Amino acid sequence: MVTGAAGFIGGHVVAALEASGHHVVPLDLRSGGDVRDAALLDRLLAGADAVVHQAAKVGLGVNVADLPGYASVNVYGTAVLLAAMAARDVRRLVLASSMVVYGEGAYDCARHGRVRPGPRRADDLARGSFEPSCPRCGDDVRYAAIGEDAPVDPRNAYATTKLAQEHLAANWARETGGTAVALRYHNVYGPGMPRDTPYSGVAAIFRSALEAGRAPRVFEDGGQTRDFVHVRDVADANVAALAGGRTGCLTAYNVASGEPHTVGEMARELAAQRGGPEPVTTGEYRLGDVRHIVAAPHRAAAELGFRARTGFAEGMKEFAGAPLA
Ligand code: UD1
């Protein structure tokens, strides 16, 4: 069973699963299937041998009025799903998690080694000082690739609920002897990405602006770094996760390209591929944003046999011309 089967990532996951010979039972709110509906889950799970759980309320949220929605869909929904899986003795779960569980990424200070900078301060950001500094001496720090054992630090409702899903899945695995694989997606992009909404990621926002003939607005100084991973690679990671991984527990894996780029580079690449307009760097900032978050992709390669295949230039070229949802 694939939950969120009609969504951006879920749709690609279903296609990849079917291409590799799986029979998929889809569930999606758009076709009336709510992941919080225990009776429905019980019917759909009869005969299922695994669940790929993509259904979620995504994005950054607008304000605290969103909290009940995040908690209900993401936390309660996952709890209902896990209970239904246990009742039907379904032993394998692949969970769509997120790199946002890490909070600000990993940094190295020349004097203090690996450090975890706290949230950036509004007055620093307002005067254009965007780089985090060492929490111990205040010196400059360099970002490093983050591994799955890094401490978690969820900083918004979405991140908190993704982490809660991981914890609930770990409880389920321990209680039932099941196997849970949490795929911590980095910044997913590609064909069928939903267009610009308050909940959209930056790639969709830039792509929507370009389609409307507007310049992408690059916040901060454009030097913030992300790992942009193609949605077909993410789908392949889900297929790999059904077969691999450590059994009888929850294991988390970064799902990333392994090729970091700045938000400014991404804007320039997309604009160039569409023939303009050129991006503008605005110096605006959002308090909740992290500066650099870049993945170490080695665990997924070693244990799931997953490596992203779509390079940045190739993927952005396709995305520049591909339809949005
Ligand atoms: C995004 C998702 C998050 C998901 C994660 C991993 C959103 C809102 N965030 O986090 O849910 O878990 O990827 O897949 O969907 N920016 C601009 N101009 C804009 C908008 C944003 O320059 O118009 C910049 C931001 O300042 C930030 C960067 O782009 O530095 C990335 O923003 P965004 O995609 O919204 O959030 P992520 O933190 O990467």
Image (tube, rainbow, N blue to C red):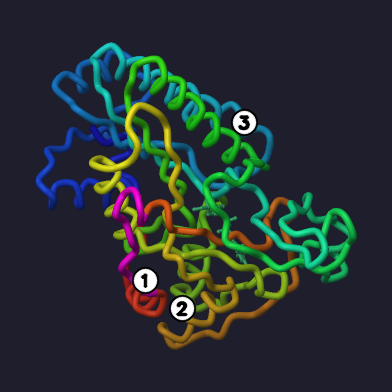
CA separation in Å, label 1 and label 3 = 32 Å
Q: What amino acid does circle 3 point to?
A: Leu
33 part of magenta stretch: no
User: Which badge, 1 or 2, comes first in the chain's sequence?
Assistant: 2
CA separation in Å, label 1 and label 2 = 8 Å
Residue 23, x across and y down, in percent: 12, 38
CA separation in Å, label 2 and label 3 = 33 Å
Residue 316, x across and y down, in percent: 40, 75
Label for residue 67? 3
**Residue ID at (18%, 33%):** 25
302 part of magenta stretch: yes
Residue 47, x across and y down, in percent: 14, 22
**Quadrant location of ligand 1?**
bottom right
Q: What amino acid does circle 1 point to?
A: Phe
> Range of the magenta residues?
301-311
Q: Specify whether tag 1 is near ligand 1 (CB below 8 Å).
A: no
Label for residue 58? none
Q: Are marks 1 and 2 in contact (CB under 8 Å)?
A: yes
Residue nearest the viewer, comparing 182 with 300 = 300
Asked whether, in this view, residue 294 is left or right of residue 33, the answer is right
Name the residue beneath numbered marker 2. Answer: 270
Badge 3: residue crowd in 10 Å (few <14, some 14–19, many ≥20):
some
**Label 1 SS:** helix
Q: What amino acid does circle 2 point to?
A: Leu
**Residue ID at (43%, 37%):** 251
Q: Specify whether tag 2 is near ligand 1 (CB below 8 Å).
A: no
**Residue ID at (41%, 84%):** 273
Q: Specify whether tag 3 is near ligand 1 (CB below 8 Å).
A: no
User: Which badge, 2 or 3, comes first in the chain's sequence?
Assistant: 3
Name the residue beneath numbered marker 1. Answer: 319
